[in-house]
């Protein structure tokens, strides 16, 4: 009978410890996932700002063509931005197909291997030689 | 009842209940913690859908100086459009294939009165209206006809998950 009680107590202790471990593990996972979700949203914010502000093609009448990329602006685009009080680095490139696939860039430093990175590619128009070509704006972002 | 207590059945039931609670709590906590990431990736697909719509509105069908959506609207409304129908479909399929996210399909539809112009990629996936996960961007393409009549054509660009992908 004593052995049975000892086993029950032991099993209860194991369950309590397991519960605590699961809780701690879930909390750590939640933090990791939250950081990933934040990085994902930051990447979306970077892509949006690039395509409607930083890289936008401006014609001779000073009219902004949102979602149209001016390739001349790619080279001088700063690749470290402060978003929500945190610094993020990113690498940007623009790919397009005219028979073969061409890629402008990448611009920005290479992403470090030891950091979590998030990549996003969206469709955009590329203004080149007076034509608007369908192109793909790709961004890889990471916490600086 | 006293005999059951002597055998410790109540304790075993309590321990079994705790075990079930532990498993349920673990599943719940780990499932719940993934929700922000799923929501963030869904927002990215929403963004892709919006960008795809704008790109089709702006980018030209080479070698014509007409945008994809304008060309599709002309194909829907007029008999002799700037871009011939088969050429437009081929060019648009190539463009969509280039932009389509892996595991997803893209459908574009324009409708006016009883006629419609539809295209989806990969072929045969349909328009994805009933797809469980879909990201829709709707807008309007306008075309001025020969008589000066301005016609607005509703446009829908839909990115949707391919079932079983």
Image (spheres, coloured by chain):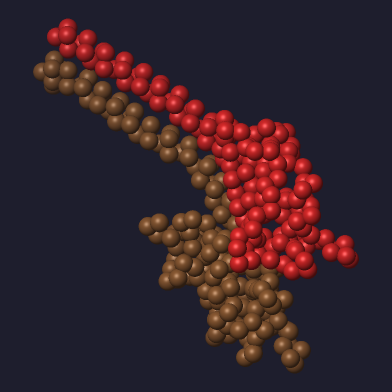
Chain colours: A red, B brown
Expressed as whole percent of the image width and height from the top left, the position of residue B74 reads 65, 83
Residue displayed at 13% across by 17% down: B7
Choose top left, top right, bottom left or bottom right for residue A98.
bottom right
Can residue A64 be seen?
A: yes
Expressed as whole percent of the image width and height from the top left, the position of residue A52 reads 74, 55
State whether residue A144 is above or below residue B94. above
State whether residue B24 is above or below residue B139. above
State whether residue B160 is above or below residue A140. below
Q: Nearer the viewer, residue B26 or B107?
A: B107
Residue displayed at 65% across by 74% down: B61
Q: Quadrant of the N terminus of chain B?
A: top left
State whether residue A33 is above or below residue A93. above
Query: Seen from this angle, which residue lies furthest right?
Result: A61
Choose top left, top right, bottom left or bottom right for residue A66.
bottom right
Query: Seen from this angle, which residue lies furthest left?
Result: B3
Expressed as whole percent of the image width and height from the top left, the position of residue B133 reads 47, 57
Residue displayed at 72% across by 55% down: A51
Query: Seen from this angle, which residue lies furthest bottom?
Result: B147
Expressed as whole percent of the image width and height from the top left, the position of residue B25 reads 38, 32
């Amino acid at each position: 009978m004593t052995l049975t009680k000892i086993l029950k107590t032991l099993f209860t202790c194991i369950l309590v410890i397991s519960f605590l471990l699961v809780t701690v593990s879930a909390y750590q996972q939640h933090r990791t996932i939250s950081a990933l979700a934040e990085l994902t949203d930051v990447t979306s914010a970077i892509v949006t700002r690039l395509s409607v502000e930083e890289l936008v093609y401006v014609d001779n009448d000073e009219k902004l063509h949102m979602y149209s990329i001016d390739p001349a602006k790619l080279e001088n685009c700063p690749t470290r931005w402060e978003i929500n009080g945190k610094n993020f680095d990113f690498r940007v490139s623009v790919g397009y197909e005219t028979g073969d696939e061409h890629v402008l860039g990448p611009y920005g430093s290479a992403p470090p291997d030891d950091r979590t990175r998030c990549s996003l590619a969206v469709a955009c128009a590329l203004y080149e030689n007076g034509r608007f070509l369908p192109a793909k704006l790709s961004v890889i972002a990471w916490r600086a | 009842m006293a005999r059951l207590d002597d055998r410790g059945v109540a304790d075993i039931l309590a321990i079994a209940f705790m075990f079930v609670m532990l498993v349920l709590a673990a599943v719940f906590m780990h499932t719940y913690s993934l929700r922000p990431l799923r929501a963030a990736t869904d927002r990215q697909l929403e963004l892709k859908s919006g960008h795809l719509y704008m790109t089709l509105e702006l980018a030209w069908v080479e070698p014509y100086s007409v945008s994809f959506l304008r060309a599709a609207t002309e194909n829907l409304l007029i008999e002799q459009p700037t871009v011939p129908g088969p050429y437009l479909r081929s060019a648009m399929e190539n463009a969509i294939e280039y932009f389509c996210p892996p595991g997803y399909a893209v459908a574009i539809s324009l409708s006016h009165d009883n006629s419609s112009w539809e295209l989806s990629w990969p072929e045969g996936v349909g328009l994805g209206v009933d797809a469980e996960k879909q990201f829709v961007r709707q807008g309007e393409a306008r075309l001025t006809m020969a008589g000066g009549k301005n016609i607005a054509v509703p446009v829908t660009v839909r990115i949707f998950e391919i079932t079983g992908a």
